[in-house]
Image: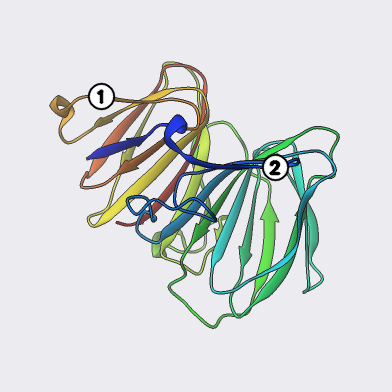
Amino acid sequence: MIQLHPFASLGGFRNEWLNAHHHFSFGHYNDPDRMGFGRLRVWNDDEVAPGAGFDPHPHKEMEIVTYIRQGAITHRDNLGNEGRTEAGDVQVMHAGTGIVHAEYNQEDTPTRLFQIWILPDRHGVAPGWGTRQFPRTGGLAVLASGRAQDSGSDALTLNADAAVMAGTLRAGETARLTIAPGRGLYLVPASGTVTIIPGSNPESGTTTVNTRDGAAITGETEIVITATSDAELVLVDVAA
């Protein structure tokens, strides 16, 4: 089954420096039908104004992945970590037993990002942070993972049985993904448009997913993704 969450249907929040859209209930936005997707609890689509950002605040027992779509974000935390993550790259913060962090846009242009929160399977771990550059071309790559199959890969580590993937497809290109039993995918095009067909049951029809829409995919063993325009995709694989 493929359930589409059109961008226009997302929750939202806006002030003088932040324009946020929420795929799942978050803050003042509460929809009992959108409380998460398996262990994926939050997917926020944020635009942060130049010279602004999130002042120091605490987190605990959460895996927080930030994927930068445009611009860059600068991270600081109470462990002494500091770093800048640019468009197409990813940072992972393990909130673990507790961390205080800040995220600022120190650029001259707006920063656009996806912030993804995943509930951990391993609790009481030491907090931490890391960032890494990844190629933005050549299909889909695993950026961060706690799945056993990704052990030893270049992916940043997650304390959760989940994986965050991203990559680009040129118009007309196709990607075929296998989905393990009991697992699902949540897919969002950062740009472009794709169609999704269940590989095991193509007669069930085609779903079109436009820029910044969400697609929750469950009960499928395989999907075929085709870019109808140049597309940049971000996906999360979790137990559904």
Q: Secondary structure at mark 1?
A: loop
* Amino acid type for the residue under numbered disc 1: Thr
User: Which quadrant: the C terminus?
Assistant: bottom left
Q: Is residue 198 above or below residue 20?
A: above
Determine which quarter of the picture holds residue 206: top left
Residue 66 coordinates in the image, percent (x, y): 62, 51
Nearest to the observer: residue 188 or residue 222: 188
Q: Is residue 34 left or right of residue 113?
A: left
Q: Which mark is residue 15?
A: 2
- What residue is at 38 percent from the left and 56 percent from the top? 35
- Residue at left offset 35%, top offset 58%: 38
User: In this rendering, is residue 57 above or below 52?
Assistant: below
**Which residue corresponds to mark 1?**
206
Label 2 packing within 10 angstroms: few (<14), some (14-19), many (20+): few
* Front in this rendered view, residue 66 or 7: 7
Left or right side of 80 for 39: left
Closest to the camera, between mark 1 and mark 2, is 2
Under circle 2, the secondary element is loop
Q: Position of residue 234 (x, y in %)?
A: 50, 40
Residue 181: image tag: none
What is the three-letter code of the residue carrying label 2?
Asn
* Foreground of the two, 11 or 162: 11
- Residue 71 image position (x, y, % from top left): 74, 36
